Amino acid sequence: MSTGGLHKRDHGGGIDAAAARYGGVRGDWLDLSTGINPCPYPMPPLPADLWHSLPDHGAEAALIAAARGFWSVPDHLDILPTHGASAAIARLPALFADLSRTVRIDEPTYNEWRASFTNAGWRVTETAAALEVYVHPNNPDGRLGPAPTKDIIRIYDESFCDIMPEASHLPHIGHESRDIILKSFGKFWGLAGLRLGFVISAPQVIASLREALGPWSVSGPALYIGAHALRDHDWAKATRARLNEDAARLDALMRDAGAGTARGTSLFRLFHVSNAQDWQSRLAAHHIWTRIFPYDSTMIRLGLPYAPEDWQRLEKALR
């Protein structure tokens, strides 16, 4: 596996490129290429001073308290809000300079992890290492990472775990552990543009990362909206139920169209097909964008439609 140079990223999205290839303008397209909740958390009214004042410690403390309550974070762990999970991913290799600069990443998975470590000069391996990374549940196939162990430092990217909070490894992070849990506001909450993430770990780990990120890492509006949303447990419960129903509906549509058994999470569904490029092109002819993968020509991933007309559009395209 390559360890030199800048690692190339491959993501969902790219509607402008899809439109250039298949026609139409951006507004014509239904983007099902990401795992972002298509019905985001409703934005609360924002106090006007959030836009012209630097974020204060009280706003960050309110967000951290809401996060501790929502995720039941143990008292011995600290929480650091960040400007998106990706900002933390890029910084994490520097926190483990005392290790052998070899990391096991449970792949295939979200490719920012490999990019972060290889760009920092680490070697990525498929065998056991002192530091391991798991996306939990995994993107794109939904598999779960193993529980923490005393002999290995593990980073868990739980960006999609809010759909199944009972699976979180947070309750199992010990007092002396350097294990790390990442959370994202862009997926379950559907607020990717807010650029809000969280790192949860031992206080000494969080202190080092806080110093690396510098002051005012998270904007005042993001602190306010995040705290408001994390206190809304009823919305979270209702959203989990809706996503489960919609994922089952998508599975049935794709199965009837000839796709194989579905995997993934209730925010995205991964299907095995005979030729993923053909499936993507077929849907793109209807201005519906999906995700295929350079490492497997039989996999196609779809996020969830939300509006009734979007479901009808997908149903028509699959006939």
Image (spheres, rainbow, N blue to C red):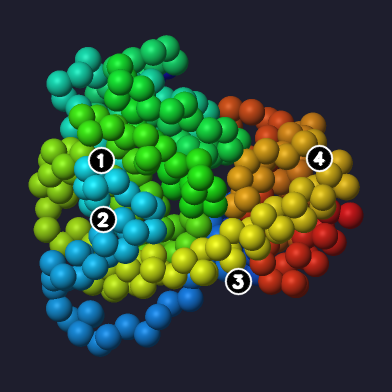
Measuring from the top left, give residue 29's x and y in whole percent: 65, 64
- The residue mark sitting in front, 1 or 4, is 1
Identify the image quadrant of residue 60. Answer: bottom left
- Sequence-first disc among 1 and 4: 1
Label 2 amino acid?
A: Pro
Label 3 amino acid?
A: Gly
- The residue mark sitting in front, 2 or 3, is 2
Q: Which mark is residue 81?
A: 2
Q: CA distance from mark 3 to mark 1?
A: 41 Å
Q: In front: 17, or 126?
A: 126
Q: Which mark is residue 201?
A: 1
Measuring from the top left, give residue 72's x and y in whole percent: 36, 52
Of the 4 image quadrants, the one containing the C terminus is bottom right
- Sequence-first disc among 3 and 4: 3
Q: Are marks 4 and 2 in contact (CB under 8 Å)?
A: no
- Is residue 250 positioned above or below 48 on the image? above
Numbered disc total: 4
Please name the residue that numbered disc 3 is placed on.
27
